[in-house]
Image (cartoon, helix red, strand yellow):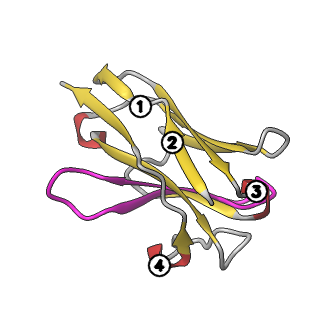
Amino acid sequence: QVQFVESGGGSVQTGGSLTLSCAASGFFLQYYSIGWFRQAPGKEREGVACIGNSGGNTYYADSVKGRFTISRDNARDTVSLQMNSLRPEDTAVYYCAANLMRTRCSAQGDAQHEYAYWGPGTQVSVSA
């Protein structure tokens, strides 16, 4: 049974930092591109960042460019999202998932229907 687990969420003030981690059981992250997504209350889930399976290819939503960094450690089979300069509008539940159709992220971001094995998410709350 495949299970994805996100961790590292929490509550911070504006300008603070958090690092989220994505791990999986029953699945090898290292062979797939992995995406981070978020869903704020009352809003649709949106793509935040993506990293290709080799780590050399990434995508960021415009709203997080320059503040968030996605990385992966294929030896440990984990994917991380370093979030700096956090803003109240970053408040959301953050999810990771695997793109079973691609090993590289497209320049415009990949459709959510290409992703599978969504974890339960981790809450990020940023106060003003």
Q: Earlier in the sequence, mark 3 or mark 1?
A: 1
- Callouts 3 and 2 close, C-beta under 8 Å: no
The kind of secondary structure element at disc 4 is: helix
The amino acid type of the residue labelled 3 equals Phe
Q: Quadrant of residue 21?
A: top right
In the rendered image, residue 53 lying in the magenta stretch gets the answer: yes
Mark 3 to mark 2 CA distance (whole Å): 15 Å
The kind of secondary structure element at disc 2 is: strand
Q: Which residue is mark 1?
A: 9
Give the answer, above or below, for where 42 lies relative to 5.
below
Label 4: how many Cα within 10 Å (few below 14, some 14–19, many 20+): few
Q: Which residue is mark 3?
A: 28
Mark 4 to mark 3 CA distance (whole Å): 20 Å
Q: Quadrant of residue 61?
A: bottom left
Q: Nearer the viewer, mark 3 or mark 1?
A: 3
Find residue 13 and report its horizontal and vertical position in percent: 28, 20
The amino acid type of the residue labelled 4 equals His
Q: Nearer the viewer, mark 4 or mark 3?
A: 3
Q: Is residue 46 left or right of residue 97?
A: left
Q: In the picture, which quadrant includes the C terminus?
A: top left
Numbered label attached to residue 6: 2
Q: Which residues are magenta?
A: 36-58
Q: In the picture, which quadrant includes the N terminus?
A: bottom right
The kind of secondary structure element at disc 1 is: loop
- Callouts 2 and 1 close, C-beta under 8 Å: yes
Numbered label attached to residue 113: 4
Label 2: how many Cα within 10 Å (few below 14, some 14–19, many 20+): many
Residue ID at (65%, 74%): 100
Q: How many marks?
A: 4
Residue ID at (59%, 71%): 107
Mark 3 to mark 1 CA distance (whole Å): 23 Å
